[in-house]
Image (tube, rainbow, N blue to C red):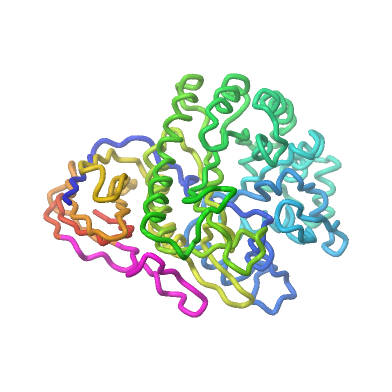
Amino acid sequence: MKHNVTVNTDQQEAVISRHIYGHFAEHLGRCIYEGLWVGEDSSIPNTNGIRTDVLKALQNINIPVLRWPGGCFADEYHWKDGIGPREERKRMVNTHWGGVVENNHFGTHEFLMLCEMLGTEPYICGNVGSGSVQEMSEWVEYMTFDGESPMADRRRENGRRDPWNVTYFGVGNESWGCGGHMRPEFYADLYRQYQTYVREYDGNRLYKIAGGANVDDYRWTEVLMREAAPFMDGLSLHYYTIPGDFWKGKGSALDFDKAEWDITMERALHMDTLISRHRAIMDSYDPEEKVGLIVDEWGTWFDVEPGTNPGFLYQQNTIRDAVVAGVTLNIFNRHAGRVHMANIAQMVNVLQAMVHTEEEKMFLTPTYHVFHMYQVHQDAALLPLHLDSDMSGENRAYPQVHGSASKQDDGTVHVSLCNLDMEEDADVTLDMRGLPDEVTWNGTILTAEHKHDHNTFEDPERVQPEAFQDYKADGGAAELRLPPMSVVVLDIS
């Protein structure tokens, strides 16, 4: 099947915010403890308690923003339990995720230290579900106020003289569900109240994010935009790609057939429909696009791996996950005018993770490699990309090829293309309009021999990026062959 792709390199659109490539780390399973935090006394090599191998791996994908401490955990988290001498911190039960004891050794200071190590901006989610206005207000004061006050003084007593720069602050999480089972009208009023006391100190400009809709709850978006848009900078959206039924069985991360592959691709592409429809509602209240759509939870969600704690949400990560990541990031790129941030769930050992760890061992997942390849789009100008191809093939009710394109300040153009089919090659004619007569082409590809291929502690490099060479280029035009289930990024300069 022939696919024609046209990119207009001289028609720049919105800037693709680097924050679209954000991440999420919740106190869930082995994401924080064992994944990121091992403590200074661990035999596992660490830097101030943070695993050194994981830290180095994450530094290499240029993470722009990191969301913490949840998720559902955020609305039962009381930040004062996680400051001061670690041996004196209150222990609690993590009622949402496995019923394990949370010792609070990883708290505000440790998280913001991690952000500084990664060179990433913190995105903190405050407790509306079980917390008070005062508690949230004092957290912001503790982190960002440089003057004399009870909270600033307490921060200094705990070893941090200067305040931190904190830009992104979420007022509650999933208030329609685990964050309080609220109606949108109630949450809208509560949001207006809480955000009033999320104050800006000493020039620290806050970007306030309201808890938005679950999947296709368009009424939630309508009510929040109508009642609270003037008081927010961003509105969140949560959507997970699940091939099965959320409650009856989501499907296996490893043991799946072609039908499950196909429905996974269809549901990954549904992200575009969701963003378009929520965006239309937001446009009616905010035509100047001042309020960003913040997709701060997304990714694949399968049944947990057999033999693991069901509350830890540990799943394997195959080439299928990599293709879903590529498609989803393409969708975010193409909606860059409204999508200001996205945060994949989650960073380590949970859901669609970047990294898996077990004691001293670590490996990188196929999804990690997609983020490494796609970082070239961060803060680049979105370019119009038009794809002309048949909608479907035999037993496939979705487009075979999906893509996005951007242009960096130095004129370098990047085109990311995904072949969503697990069996058929895709022959692509790529017409890059507006380029100079002489350009240089390079490419990187991530693919696999089998749909179940994934990396393991025993075989950590089974799925790895390679140089892409199956193309013939002439000036601004090229003929490409994309193998099945592949993600390709082209560099044209």
Quadrant of res 56: bottom right
- Residue at 30% x, 40% y is 383
| Furthest residue in direction right, as rendered | 88
Question: Does the rendering let one see residue 208?
Answer: no
Magenta region, main secondary structure: loop
Which image quadrant: the C terminus?
A: bottom left
Question: Does the rendering let one see residue 114?
Answer: yes
- Residue at 24% x, 50% y is 394
Quadrant of res 28: bottom right
For this rendering, which residue is in front, 187 or 292? 187
For this rendering, which residue is in front, 301 or 190? 301
Residue 351, given in percent of the width and then of the height, sits at: 56, 57
Residue 390, given in percent of the width and then of the height, sits at: 21, 43
Magenta highlight range = 444-471
- 427 within the magenta span: no
Instruction: Work out whether 251 lies above or below 202.
Output: below
**In the drawing, does residue 475 fall left or right of residue 488?**
left
Quadrant of res 203: top right
**In the drawing, does residue 400 fall left or right of residue 56?**
left
| Furthest residue in direction front, as rendered | 248
**In the drawing, does residue 29 fall left or right of residue 142?**
left
Residue 304, given in percent of the width and then of the height, sits at: 58, 61
Instruction: Work out whether 428 lies above or below 184.
Output: below
